[in-house]
Amino acid sequence: MSVQDITLIGVPLEAGAGRRGCIMGPDAFRTAGLSEALGELGHSVRDVGNIQPEQVSLPETPGVVLKNLDAIAGWTRALHGRALELGLRETLPIYMGGDHALAAGTVTGHAAAANELGRPLFVLWLDAHTDFNTLDSTRSGNLHGTPLAFACGLPGFESYLGHPLNAPVDPGNVEILGVRSIDRQESELLLEYGVSVSDMRRIDEIGIAGLLRPFLDRVAEANGLLHVSLDVDFIDPEIAPAVGTTVPGGATFREAHLVMEMLHDSGLVTSLDLVELNPFLDDRGRTARLMVDLTSSLFGKRVFDRPTRSF
Ligand code: MG
Ligand code: MG
């Protein structure tokens, strides 16, 4: 197994979510032992602490109900800059969220870095939702439902960075797995932009490995970089309750681990978001520990490394 240089960055952001609590996410990942678990696998891990947002004050837009747009713009700008810088270094960043709005900064920063390196960026989005709303299409106004649309260069997001995105992700390089809740307008946009979306029914019928393998083959053939964005609600709420947007019928324990194991075997992952962990809704740290365990699988932990529990 290859040893990785890993940088952990906390993103205490909850302004994009409809419920409060994700601000505690980074500390829950620390308490659940993310750094130690990756260190025990032989990797070199450095926790650089929490990133702070820029202060942004946008002019009021009358009649538009977008929640905390100033705050999201501030986080996006700070994260975009940091992700661009880290994407050009020999380290694998893990962004410990924080709600999914953080991906507006991380994905676009890594896309900008990939562009400088002359390589395509691919994105694997593991989520019950597609997060492909624009600022015009969102019904809830919760901006954690928009980062993927922004990263793919959809129009109307100039306020996020203060300027247009100069290296958007090719929507054809995005794979969304685990979907079971989607707005009608989002669905039309996904079709229009040609994003590959697999809902839980496809996972049931084809199997998660059969969906993931062709995507990983494409990344390898294109010599691409691969950003993985893991939303807690990808996993079934029965085993991962600490999320504000639970939707029944999510990925099972084994399906989620299999994705992580295949990602590890591929050796293709270059950056990772762990998002939407809401410790306020957790059951004695159970979801935080599951997320740490899944991340360990992505970094080489195998089934027979796990101790057998006796009762
Ligand atoms: Mg999400
Ligand atoms: Mg979600």
Image: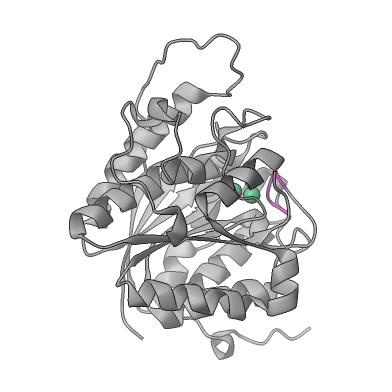
Residue 207 falls in which quadrant of the image? bottom right
Observer-nearest of 269 and 137: 137
52, above or below 169, in the image: above
Picture coordinates of residue 175 (x, y %)? 52, 62
Observer-nearest of 47 and 120: 120
**Residue at point 35%, 31% (across, down):** 161
**In the rendered image, which quarter contains the N terminus?**
bottom left
Left or right of 19, for residue 238: right
**Residue at point 42%, 47% (across, down):** 10
**Residue at point 40%, 50% (across, down):** 107
**Residue at point 45%, 53% (across, down):** 171
Residue 292 falls in which quadrant of the image? bottom right
Picture coordinates of residue 245 (x, y %)? 71, 45
Q: Is residue 243 magenta?
A: yes
91, above or below 193, in the image: below
219, above or below 34, in the image: below
Asked whether the viewer can see residue 252, the reply is no
Residue 248 falls in which quadrant of the image? bottom right
Picture coordinates of residue 29 (x, y %)? 52, 56
- Please, what is the dominant secondary structure of the magenta stretch? loop
Q: Which range of residues does the magenta coloring cover?
A: 241-245
Asked whether the viewer can see residue 249, the reply is yes
The count of marks equals: 0
Left or right of 92, for residue 100: right
Picture coordinates of residue 267 (x, y %)? 37, 78
26, above or below 42, in the image: above
| Residue reaching furthest to the bottom | 304
Q: Is residue 52 magenta?
A: no
